[in-house]
Amino acid sequence: METRDDLLIALKKTTLGTVTKDSSIEEKFQNETLRPILKFQNDLLLEVFRNYAIKQKGMFFTLSPEKKTMYVENSIQKDIKFRNSLKGIVIGLFTVTEYKEYILNSSNLNKRIMNLIIERIKSQIQLLELVD
């Protein structure tokens, strides 16, 4: 029987980004663990952000494209509860080994996670229109 870790490793079989012998531990973790998880969770992350924007009185949907990108950055950087929710969506797909690696440098890796999520959402902002 496959373990949880075996199933999670199978989901992340492809490294996204370049990993060399000179890559830092954080860069290696980002490209081997974080990027595959974010790619896998992309649709969920977009829907979570859409729901967040709706619950914040839907103002996001009336903004210009430039202001929408600022809204994405500000909401993820300043709303701690929302930020923790997004972080949980990513950390929940760590293997036990990855989690142990993560906790050794969680502060820097959290910054990477948030920056990657922000850039991912901003690059797909046109997909965040209201859906009935």
Image: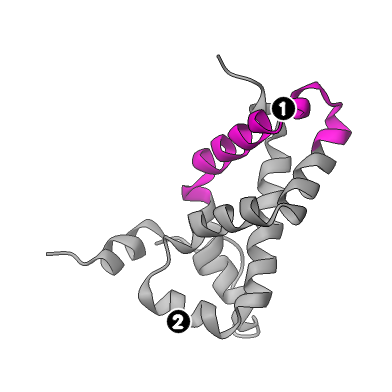
Q: Does the magenta stretch include residue 62?
A: yes
Q: In this rendering, is residue 111 above or below 28?
A: above
The amino acid on which the numbered mark 2 sits, given as a three-letter code, is: Lys
**First reached walking from the N terminus: tag 1 or tag 2:** 1
Mark 1, Cα crowd under 10 Å, few <14 / some 14-19 / many 20+, is few
Taking the spot 87% from the left edge, 26% from the top edge, the residue there is 64
- Residue 41 position, x and y percent, is 49, 47
In the displayed structure, does residue 13 sit left or right of residue 39? Answer: left
Residue 29: name its quadrant: bottom right
The amino acid on which the numbered mark 1 sits, given as a three-letter code, is: Lys
How far apart are labels 1 and 2 at the CA level?
A: 39 Å
Which quadrant of the rendered structure holds the N terminus?
A: bottom left
The secondary structure that most of the magenta stretch takes on is helix
- Residue 71 position, x and y percent, is 80, 40
- Residue 112 position, x and y percent, is 67, 66
Q: In this rendering, is residue 55 above or below 120?
A: above
Taking the spot 43% from the left edge, 61% from the top edge, the residue there is 92
Q: What stretch is highlighted in magenta?
A: 39-68
Asked whether residue 20 appears in the rendered view, the answer is: no
Indicate the secondary structure of the residue bearing disc 1.
loop
Q: Is residue 6 magenta?
A: no
